[in-house]
Structures are given as structure tokens and as C-alpha cells.
Image: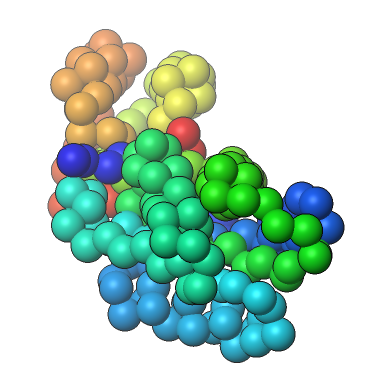
Amino acid sequence: MEQHYMNRLDTETETTINKSRFISSIRRTDTEAEAKAFIDEVRRRHKDATHNCSAYIIGEHALTQKADDDGEPSGTAGVPILEVLKREGMYNVTVAVTRYFGGIKLGGGGLIRAYSNAASDAVKTAGKVIEVSMIPFRITMDYTHTSRFEHYTAEAGIEIKDTGYTDKVTYLVHVKTAEKDIFLSKLREITKDTHELDELDIIHAESAF
């Protein structure tokens, strides 16, 4: 199984079902140690809660994953949270759902729905990003080409990270690895192949999904 997305934000959501409060906390966790530390943090913060259930997935291939029911009937809390993370294609993420019991039992099916919905709300609120390989290019060109170049980068969604001005203009741009050939072809067309180009080492960046 290969997961594709990480959470964009670390955040918290809350809902009430039959007088029970469900507080969902989501955090980016790159290692299992970070996941466990976050779960411990939630437990300390909500030490008076009835349950602090959780699940996490570490690694794009989901080689490390764990679900914890924390006293809820087996399979009604941690596993539903984990299944949401799998279905949403998430990795390097931990979700802890805190329950303050309101006096009304939800039953097995009700608990599964409640914890699933709580986890889904957390993922939706946090948003998703994907990791993409980017190539930084440093490009120097005559002023006569800058207007067209900047128009092209804006339309193509290529971010200009830095601009320097001397007798010519030097741009630092980050281009997705998969779009390298298209970019270089367009650059040659814009400058009539008169630009100077430095290709730097590949970096990894995040892009909103």
C-alpha cells in the first residue's frame, strides 16, 4: 500500500454526539517516536477524558501503523481512525480522538461511526499536501524578455523565488521535475536561447492538494 498525502496543518476539531464530546487532534509526525510523543501529549492535556483513542501511519508505504482503542470496545475506535487515514491516502500523520462520555452509550456501530467521522473531520480541516521533487534554476536574461517570462511563469504556476537586477535580470525559480523539459523549451523560445542557466540540486517541496 502506498500513501500519497500529508496533512497541511496541525489542528483540532470537536463535535458532540449524544452528549459525548469528541475532540480530534491531528499532527504531522515523521517518525513513530514523534507519533507516540504526540499521543502522550494529548493524554496529558485531556487526562480527565474517558478515552484518548489514536492511530498513526508512518512512511509512504505505511510500513509502520498502529491503532489504539484506549478502553473502548475492541475495534470500535482506533481501527476506524486508522481506516480513515488509509482511505484518505495519508502518511506521516497521527490522529488522536478524545472522548468525554456524556452518559449515553452509542453501541458498537455508533462508536465506529463517531470515531470515523471525528477522524474525517480532522483530516478535512487539516487539508492535504503532496511532496514533489523540484529543480531550482537560476536564469539570467536581458530585460527585453522579462515581461513575457514573468507572464509565462504566472500562467504555468511556477513560483519565482528570488529576482536580482544588474545590467540583466537573474531569476531563481523552482520547477517540478516532471515539467523540466517543457519549462526549458519554453524558456528557449522566450529568450531566443540567449539566457544563461544554472541547474541546481533537486529539492523536495510540498504542494497543496
Q: Residue at x 73, y 70 (%)?
A: 100
Of the pair 86 and 75, the residue shown nearer to us: 75
> Split into 4 quadrants, where in the image is the N terminus?
top left
The image quarter in which residue 47 lies: bottom right
Of the pair 155 and 51, the residue shown nearer to us: 51
Q: Compared to 173, does 194 lie above or below?
A: above
Q: Position of residue 208 (x, y in %)?
A: 48, 38
Q: Compared to 116, does 21 lie above or below?
A: below
Query: On the picture, is 106 further left or further right than 64?
Result: right
Of the pair 111 and 197, the residue shown nearer to us: 111
Q: Residue at x 53, y 66 (%)?
A: 72
Q: Position of residue 131 (x, y in %)?
A: 32, 45
Query: Can residue 28 be seen from the camera position used here?
Result: no
Q: Residue at x 46, y 66 (%)?
A: 69
Q: Position of residue 20 (x, y in %)?
A: 76, 60
Query: On the picture, is 35 further left or further right than 139?
Result: right
Q: Residue at x 70, y 85 (%)?
A: 48
Query: On the picture, is 36 further left or further right than 1?
Result: right
Q: Position of residue 44 (x, y in %)?
A: 60, 88
Q: Compared to 21, does 45 lie above or below?
A: below
Query: On the picture, is 141 further left or further right than 101?
Result: left
